[in-house]
């Protein structure tokens, strides 16, 4: 191997070794690039550096962007500065000595030529040698001082007048003969100034060169002729792990962050109510915090009110700013996806590049396929996760770091103020006073990205260890409260998933919540009318109540049932309640008040700060018995309170008028004796409302019978073999089920509907045979009564295990045994023998819940 080739391979090996040091953090990117220049030389670095760092484009995009920026800066601006300085010196020497040969040598080099730094310096030194030989009367020390003085004045001229051309600076310098004369005469004052300026200049250059390597993560660029990038923010109000933001930095042009508010587009079709009052208020606060974050990195957010449509506004921005690139993170609501597709298509026709990045969900809902899994169990999260495992998409990747700064444009477009968007506009009374309904919301939340990260960190350090078993507790902070931050993109699902996996305790239940979220968006892409149209045709004919007074009492937390009232008051005051309480209030509205699920959906959309169309629509459809899945439970408004609020702390916080009632009766104050009510200061109808419905069992029976009647009336939508409901499938699912390609999808849309059996509650199947039977006689009664009393179970008292986890586990075992027993009775099978050594009921106990620990010996007479 030739010596030169061996040296080249050795240099490349050194570069790769140093690159590994950069990856592990033991070397900075600027030092790595300097080492490359030293080891390979300018020409080799120019031609080979990008190929050497190419593997980083997928392994570490942030580092790849940083090194690319350093490379571009070094071989453009820094080199041009050196070449410009060399040209200035040569022009000065040409004017001083009037050497025609020197003039011809320099005339072939222009500031725009792509010459490397070494050739520029060699040419300058050659001219210096030539000048010194022709002018022997000048001593070497005098020549050095003279050149240093010229360099100082050229740089000073460029600093004082950045827009001044090089020729003007040279002419000014050549005309100031008095300064040159003083230098030749040995003017000590000027000489001292020159010596003090030399290290200062080199230090400033080191700073500039160091900053150039951080352009992707922190350099505010000067005004440039390069067209800017429009960065369109929607529900991605964060700096960390923002693919569109990093993508804009990789373009290498100034970035203009914009937010366009178009309420007509955001609201969606029909009665979607995609952006309610609480959501608008959160959005206002989040935009304010996000704009402050952008200002800290040298940029700011431009607010715009849509002029007709977002597309028209963006076109106006493109024309105004000269931008040729528009970047944004994708949204997956069908009407917003259609809007974004129209924007991309229209801009591309105009020659403007427009790209949408995936970041709002863990998986792109439009990429989910049932191929290889089938449709059995569709609507459940287990089926959805199987589809994701069977048809994996692109890798999740590593969360992206925050940029340290953004390159800014020379001219900013004219925007409007945040207040003018009207997101946080409060109603006024007739006397002109403002009704500030968001006071408690402001006190309850930190709307910033840093607030989201702090809440996640606090949850992973504490609440996550109780989440698996006690996430249903309303009286304990065992939930993450991260849903509003996820909805508005202040926290990315990828970042959340990575942090959850990195925690010492990795609860699958918590990580599974992201699967539920993706499932909701997948269903919304399949059924765009999910927010208002029941998926199961028979349930559209249910006899819903039209009692508006019941609906108003439910909305205001005035039902007379403390657990329901506490949850609805928390929702109104803070804009949030945990998932268990959402099930409680939804069950009460549908199963006990007979009010349609659409009313609950609309109220949640208006009052929840995390109101998400896909999630709310899926939940209310399932709770309203007409979604792809069925809740296999109905929360009892009284007895279920013993599970989520066993000591009444939650009710006391949000219904303070009941605070003095004892734990045993606080969830059913109507059973308190009059003397106890007087001592507690409770007067029904005055301090606390009367119950709007009294006979819960009768209401529940009526609800169950209504379901049986509509299923009997629409038997064509009931599978005769399994008793499951049949749901018309969208063409996309039918194509996948039949193995057809998307090109053949048109064949599926023709002809009859394709009906498929979906998950149906067991008690509905049983009730169909006897519609007049009461709910208590149904062996599959789905009412979840909770753990009625913590004093009833002698086993837990004996083992001193009165914690919430033990109670839930015990209730689950008892429920499973009851279902198994009912199944055996229906099928005519004998009862299973009682296992030895298990807890058994005491034969003389008056309380049917009293049991004794297995193995204990008692004598009975």
Image (cartoon, helix red, strand yellow):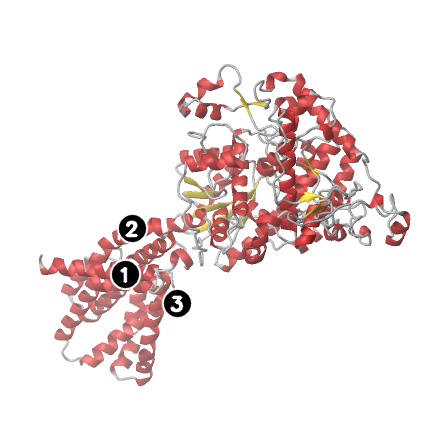
Quarter assignment of residue 839 = top right
Q: Alpha-carbon neighbours of circle 1 within 10 Å: few (<14), some, or many (≥20)? A: some
Q: Where is residue 307 in the image (x, y as percent from the top left)?
A: 56, 38
**Tag 1 or tag 2, which sits nearer the N-term?**
2
Question: Left or right: where does residue 169 sit relative to residue 509?
Answer: left
How many marks do you count on the picture? 3
Locate residue 592, reporting x and y percent.
74, 33
Residue closest to the eye, 279 or 222: 279
- Measured Cα–Cα span from mark 2 to mark 1: 23 Å
Give the structural element (helix, strand or loop) at label 3.
Answer: helix
Q: Is residue 143 left or right of 832 when viewed as pictured?
A: left
Identify which residue, 514 or 125, lies in the foreground.
514
- Determine which residue is flagged by label 3: 160
Q: Name the residue under label 1.
A: 79
Where does label 2 land, which residue? 54
Q: Is residue 371 visible?
A: yes
């Amino acid at each position: 191997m030739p010596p030169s080739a061996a040296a080249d391979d050795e240099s490349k090996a050194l570069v790769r070794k140093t690159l590994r040091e950069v990856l592990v953090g033991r070397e900075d990117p600027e030092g790595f690039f300097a080492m490359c220049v030293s080891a390979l030389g300018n020409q080799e670095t120019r031609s080979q550096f990008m190929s050497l760092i190419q593997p980083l484009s997928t392994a570490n995009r942030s580092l790849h962007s940083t090194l690319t920026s350093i490379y571009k800066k070094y071989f453009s601006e820094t080199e041009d500065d050196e070449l410009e300085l060399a040209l200035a010196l040569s022009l000065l020497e040409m004017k001083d000595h009037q050497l025609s040969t020197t003039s011809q040598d320099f005339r072939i080099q222009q500031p725009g030529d792509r010459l490397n730094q070494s050739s520029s310096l060699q040419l300058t030194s050659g001219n210096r040698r030539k000048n010194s030989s022709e002018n022997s009367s000048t001593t070497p020390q005098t020549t050095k001082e003279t050149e240093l003085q010229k360099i100082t004045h050229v740089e000073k001229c460029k600093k004082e007048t950045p827009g001044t051309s090089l020729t003007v600076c040279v002419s000014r310098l050549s005309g100031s003969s008095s300064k040159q004369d003083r230098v030749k005469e040995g003017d000590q004052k000027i000489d001292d100034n020159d010596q003090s300026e030399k290290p200062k200049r080199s230090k400033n250059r080191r700073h500039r060169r160091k900053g150039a390597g951080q352009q992707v993560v922190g350099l505010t660029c000067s005004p440039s002729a390069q067209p800017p990038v429009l960065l369109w923010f929607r529900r991605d109000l964060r700096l960390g792990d923002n693919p569109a933001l990093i993508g804009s930095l990789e373009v290498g042009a100034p970035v203009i962050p914009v937010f366009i508010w178009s309420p007509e587009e955001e609201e969606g079709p029909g009665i979607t109510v995609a952006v309610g009052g609480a959501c608008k208020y959160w959005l206002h606060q989040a935009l304010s915090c996000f704009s402050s974050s952008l200002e800290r990195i040298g940029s700011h957010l431009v607010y715009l009110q849509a002029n007709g449509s977002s597309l028209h506004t963006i076109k106006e921005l493109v024309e105004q700013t000269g931008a040729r690139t528009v970047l944004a993170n994708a949204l997956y609501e069908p009407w917003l996806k259609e809007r974004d597709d129209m924007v991309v298509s229209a801009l591309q026709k105009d020659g403007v590049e427009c790209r949408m990045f995936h970041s709002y969900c863990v998986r792109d809902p439009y990429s989910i396929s049932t191929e290889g899994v089938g449709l059995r169990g569709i609507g459940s999260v287990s089926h959805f996760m199987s589809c994701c495992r069977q048809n994996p998409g692109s890798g999740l990747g590593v969360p992206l770091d925050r940029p340290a700064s953004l390159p800014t444009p020379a001219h900013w477009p004219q925007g409007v103020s945040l207040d003018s968007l009207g997101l946080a506009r409060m109603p006024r009374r007739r006397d002109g006073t403002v009704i500030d309904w968001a006071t408690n919301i402001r006190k309850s939340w930190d709307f910033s990205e840093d607030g989201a990260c702090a809440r996640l960190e606090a949850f992973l350090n504490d609440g996550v260890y109780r989440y698996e078993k006690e996430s249903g507790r309303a009286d304990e902070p065992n939930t993450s409260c991260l849903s509003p931050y996820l909805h508005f993109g202040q926290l990315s699902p990828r970042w959340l998933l990575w942090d959850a996996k990195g925690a010492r305790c990795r609860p699958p239940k918590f990580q599974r919540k992201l699967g539920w979220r993706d499932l909701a968006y997948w269903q919304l892409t399949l059924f765009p009318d999910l927010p208002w149209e029941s998926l199961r045709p028979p349930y559209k004919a249910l006899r819903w109540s039209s009692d508006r007074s019941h609906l108003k009492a439910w909305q205001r937390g005035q039902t007379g049932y403390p657990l329901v009232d506490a949850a609805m008051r928390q929702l109104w005051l803070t804009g949030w309640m945990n998932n268990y309480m959402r099930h409680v209030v939804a069950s009460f509205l549908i199963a006990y008040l007979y009010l349609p699920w659409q009313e609950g959906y609309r109220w949640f959309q208006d009052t929840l700060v995390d109101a998400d169309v896909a999630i709310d629509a899926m939940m209310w459809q399932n709770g309203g018995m007409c979604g792809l899945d069925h809740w296999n439970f109905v929360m009892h408004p009284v007895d279920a309170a013993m599970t989520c609020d066993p000591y009444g702390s939650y009710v006391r916080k949000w219904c303070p008028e009941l605070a003095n009632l004892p734990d045993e009766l606080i969830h059913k104050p109507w059973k308190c004796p009059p003397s106890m009510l007087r001592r507690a200061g409770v007067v029904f109808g005055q301090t606390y409302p009367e119950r709007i419905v009294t006979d819960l069992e009768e209401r529940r029976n009526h609800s169950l019978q209504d379901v049986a009647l509509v299923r009997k009336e629409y038997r064509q939508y009931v599978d005769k073999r399994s008793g499951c409901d049949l749901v018309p499938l969208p063409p996309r699912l039918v194509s996948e089920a039949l193995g057809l390609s998307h090109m053949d999808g048109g064949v599926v849309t023709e002809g009859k509907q394709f009906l498929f059996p979906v998950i149906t509650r067991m008690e509905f199947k049983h009730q169909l045979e006897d519609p007049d039977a009461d709910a208590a006689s149904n062996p599959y009664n789905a009412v979840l009564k909770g753990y009625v009393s913590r004093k009833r179970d002698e086993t837990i008292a004996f083992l001193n295990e009165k914690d919430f986890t033990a109670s839930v586990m015990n209730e689950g075992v008892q429920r499973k045994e009851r279902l198994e027993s009912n199944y055996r009775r229906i099928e005519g099978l004998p009862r299973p023998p009682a296992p030895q050594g298990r807890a058994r009921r005491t034969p003389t106990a008056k309380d049917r819940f009293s049991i004794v620990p297995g193995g204990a010996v008692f004598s009975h007479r």
